[in-house]
Amino acid sequence: MSRFAEGPDPVFHELNRSLPFDRRLWPQDVAQSRAHAGMLAAQQIIGQEDRDAIHAALATVETELAEERFPFADADEDIHMAIERRVTELAGPAGGRLHTARSRNDQVATDLALWVREEADAASELVTGLMRALCNAAERHLDWPMPGYTHLQRAQPVYLSHHLLAYVWMLDRDRVRLAAVRASAGTLPLGAGALAGVNFVTDRAAVAAALGFEHGPAPNSIDAVSNRDFALDFLAAAATCATHLSRLGAEIVLFSSEEFGFCEVSDAWASGSSIMPQKKNPDAAELLRAKAPRVAGHLVALHGVMHGLPLTYNKDLQEDKEHLFDAADTLSLCLRAATGMIATTTWNAERLHAASGDEMIAAVDLADLLVRRGLPFREAHGVVAGLVRDALAAGVPLSGLSREQLAARSELIDEEYYEVLRRGTWLESKVSAGGTSLDRVCEQLADARALLAA
Ligand code: ARG
């Protein structure tokens, strides 16, 4: 019997139906139904035989879904109704007792929280894999100098290992964010009913324990069915992580161009041109660059769905899923691609060396020489800026300026000026913690490795 005299308009059915995308929540829906039926029997809300019949039917449903031979029906609106319908077909009247003390509102929130928790863990694993690939690449290029940039202008030289390790720390913050997502999805919505609670003495703590919600049952039933903060949190963490991959991709695009020539992605991560036979395009890196706004777009879209939404459940909330699913799939794909690409990218020692050998890059070191002679840094900066102008005007490197030209800028400059330029020690002079001297980079690499081993 139904309240409705006629069935849904086909267009409404298509609009309303979430089965095409929420069917991937089936493992979560089976798990929670199992836990729910177990609790109902333990509380003597349903009989043991009913529970056993439900559990047996759920086992069949699970196999059918895993083997992709579950008999979906056109009328199935979503995965929750499809599974309940099938359980009732298989278990008879006992199946009709499964939805006792449960609503699709607390059911869908629970499935989604379970899914977000698993997905956050999976993403974190992939992030760890990429961190490992970056550490390995850093180790292979420990003392390869390269120019460091600000404003994309050569600024100060650094070691390639130091530059690659920068991404490791960015990614480690992503892992921290993903762990926080797991915690934010750590309270159990189930048991909230439609919104007000249910007319039975349930044991929500037992269900929370059975499903691994370590923060126990959500304390407020109204909040429990309205809450999608954990989905926003996942999307925010995913968007930031995708943005990190985008910056990595962008640098690989730049560095692998002929103009830079710093690196070359392996053939397995590049494609050719349909017309220009000589081309090798870093498509994977370009796509890493371009996928990030798509993930961030999903975050913005869900904020749009949630903002101004009255409590409690509204069908609007069904729109959370496609944003989450696409963001998670996109992030996973990008993380796997970044890992493979970084592991096989080769770096060109000569090009890196030539680009970082530019004497101009020693300007700060020359200013610091004057600082050690007692000149305030701001004045030393001015003196060296004058020398840079002199060198550029004369078309010579900094070491090509004469003693007289130096003296004209400051009487504090002596032979050691040439010495600093000759030694070329401006990498090894960066001894501050987190700096580019080799000892510091090795320390950093060891810290990063320890983080990965933990
Ligand atoms: N397919 C729905 C969703 O994804 C399930 C919850 C429906 N609840 C309801 N009262 N109509 O949000």
Image (cartoon, rainbow, N blue to C red):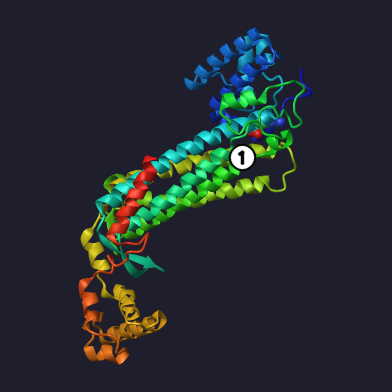
Q: Position of residue 411 (x, y in %)?
A: 29, 90
The quadrant the N terminus occupies is: top right
Q: Amino acid at mark 1?
A: Asp
Comparing 246 with 421, the one in front is 421
Q: Position of residue 72 (x, y in %)?
A: 57, 21
Question: Foreground: 13 or 106?
Answer: 106
Q: Secondary structure at mark 1?
A: helix
Q: Is residue 130 visible?
A: no
The answer to whether the residue bearing label 1 lies less than 8 angstroms from the nearest atom of ligand 1 is yes
Q: Which residue is mark 1?
A: 320
The residue positioned 68% from the left and 35% from the top of the image is: 224
The quadrant of the picture occupied by the C terminus is top left
- Which residue is rendered at x = 69% and y = 31% of the image? 105
Which of the 4 image quadrants contains residue 104?
top right
Give the image location of residue 77, x and y in percent. 64, 27
Q: Residue 171 or 403: which is nearer the viewer? A: 403
